[in-house]
Amino acid sequence: MEKVSTIGLDVAKHVFQVHGVDAQGAVVVRRKLRRDDVVAFFTSLPACLIGIEACATSHHWARVLTALGHEVRLMPASYVKPYVKRQKNDASDAEAICEAVTRPTMRFVPTKSEEQQSVLMLHRVRELLIRQRTMLVNALRGHLAELGIITRQGATGLSMLVALVEDEGHDLIPPLARSALFLLVQQLREVHEKVGELDRQIHIWHRSHELSRRLETIPDHRQRNRCDRDRCFPVQIRPATRGLAWPGAATELIRRKGSARADQQARRSLHPSPSCCGSPCRASLLS
């Protein structure tokens, strides 16, 4: 094999595509590699320039190939797309990557370390759990709304709903519905505890990282982060062993329901029935 100067590597889960050229731009190698053969193939090559599209696994392969002595450059996929000459496939993508990495005006993505990716995973898992918690809260509110139970938005209203589900001393919620909603409350508590644990891990990492502590010295940076945390953690659900979050929730809702029925009856009495309004009723029209 002639000396390879530049390689475009299209990474995947199992099959990788390699497109390599020499210093004059002539194609030297074009082949597919199984995942287990990638390290052995690049170990046998002399040090060269390798271009990879920035994606979820590209940073891992950039670290691996850099450790073998190669120069690896990551590029956004949107910057590589204009260099695809024909229909999109692995071979065309690898050729486009090989050409794009040599462009003098190309912009590259810095390779992330394992620590940087780990911190990003903490944030992404936390965001996922927050979305799941929001889904659980919306489901709990929606199911109880079907039974005519509505509370105000925010932590106070949610605590009231949780107390209603856990309190068996009233008949506002049927037993069958209560058994289903109790599972949502349990899962909501578990997700909330996991979010708090991730928040503590992020805080510990922040205190141990010099650059992150320096970012905290930016004016208004700390207050802005505090506001973001307050929006992300508005719900404070007490553990079941500590009693109900709202002891008088059932009594309050029963009172509200009674006043609502009285209001509906009062409004209904203000409107005359069709038989006494002087106009023929629906029954007379159909007869």
Image (cartoon, rainbow, N blue to C red):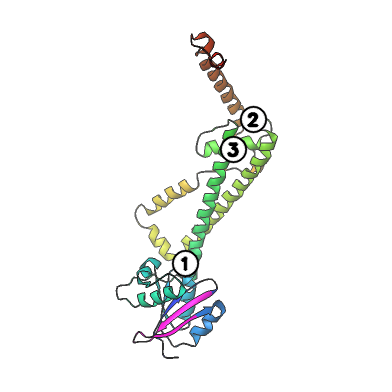
User: Label 3 is placed on what type of residue?
Assistant: His
Q: Nearer the viewer, residue 142 or 122?
A: 142
Q: Which residues are magenta?
A: 15-31
- Estimate how packed mark 2 is, as few (under 14), some (14 to 19) or many (20 or more) residues with alpha carbons within 10 Å: some
The amino acid marked with disc number 1 is Gln
- Name which residue lies at 38% across and 66% down: 78
Q: Which residue is mark 1?
A: 116
The Cα atoms of the two marked residues, 3 and 2, are separated by 13 Å
Label 3 sits on residue: 143
Give the mark nearer the N terminus: 3 vs 1: 1
Q: Position of residue 232 (x, y in %)?
A: 48, 48
Which of pointers 3 and 2 indicates the residue nearer the eye? 3
Tell whether 215 sits left or right of 205.
Answer: left
**Label of residue 172 in the image:** 2
Q: Residue 63 appears at what percent x and percent y?
A: 47, 76
Mark 1 secondary-structure assignment? helix
